[in-house]
């Protein structure tokens, strides 16, 4: 899969608040994702280079210079922020 395809699939795993989590631990189980776990799930096992490429594109979509988990874990982070970052990354990888 390309980074573009992975990002589209990862965003689809977090359609609403019930499927998104922020912080260090997933409080709701397998059907709940942070951006990194969604990217990992969309990539599949054994595809580290594809995962890395998609994660780097997402990080650029956040427009900040920090770990994705730190960005996602900020108390003022919203699901809308996550979707905007995914959208920016998806657009940037469309070429």
Image (tube, rainbow, N blue to C red):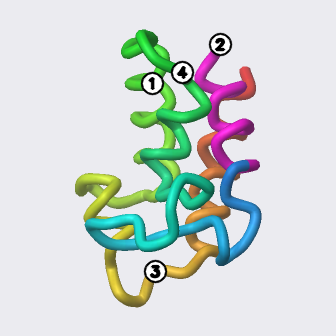
Cα gap from disc 3 to disc 4, whole angstroms: 26 Å
Pick whichever of labels 3 and 4 is earlier in the sequence.
Answer: 4
Does dot 4 land on a helix, a strand or a loop? loop
Q: Residues within 10 Å of mark 4 (few under 14, many from 20)?
A: few
In screen coordinates, is 56 left or right of 43? left
* Corner quadrant of residue 75: bottom left
Query: The C terminus is located in which quarter?
Result: top right
Determine which residue is flagged by label 2. 1
Would residue 1 be counted in the magenta stretch?
A: no
Determine which residue is flagged by label 1. 51
Does dot 1 land on a helix, a strand or a loop? helix
Number of numbered discs present?
A: 4
Cα gap from disc 2 to disc 1, whole angstroms: 9 Å
Magenta range: 2-12
Cα gap from disc 1 to disc 4, whole angstroms: 8 Å
Tell me if label 2 and label 4 are in contact, CB under 8 Å.
Answer: yes
Instruction: Indicate the position of residue 4 as horizontal and vertical percent values.
Output: 67, 27
Q: Residues within 10 Å of mark 1 (few under 14, many from 20)?
A: many
Determine which residue is flagged by label 4. 44
Cα gap from disc 2 to disc 3, whole angstroms: 29 Å
Cα gap from disc 2 to disc 4, whole angstroms: 10 Å
């Amino acid at each position: 899969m390309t980074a573009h395809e992975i990002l589209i699939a990862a965003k689809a795993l977090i359609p609403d608040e019930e499927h998104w989590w922020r912080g260090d631990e997933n409080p709701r189980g397998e059907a709940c994702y942070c951006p990194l776990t969604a990217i990992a799930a969309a990539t599949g096992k054994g595809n580290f280079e594809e995962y890395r490429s998609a994660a780097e594109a997402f990080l650029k979509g956040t427009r900040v210079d920090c770990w994705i988990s730190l960005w996602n874990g900020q108390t003022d982070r919203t699901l809308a922020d996550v979707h905007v970052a995914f959208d920016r990354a998806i657009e940037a990888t469309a070429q």
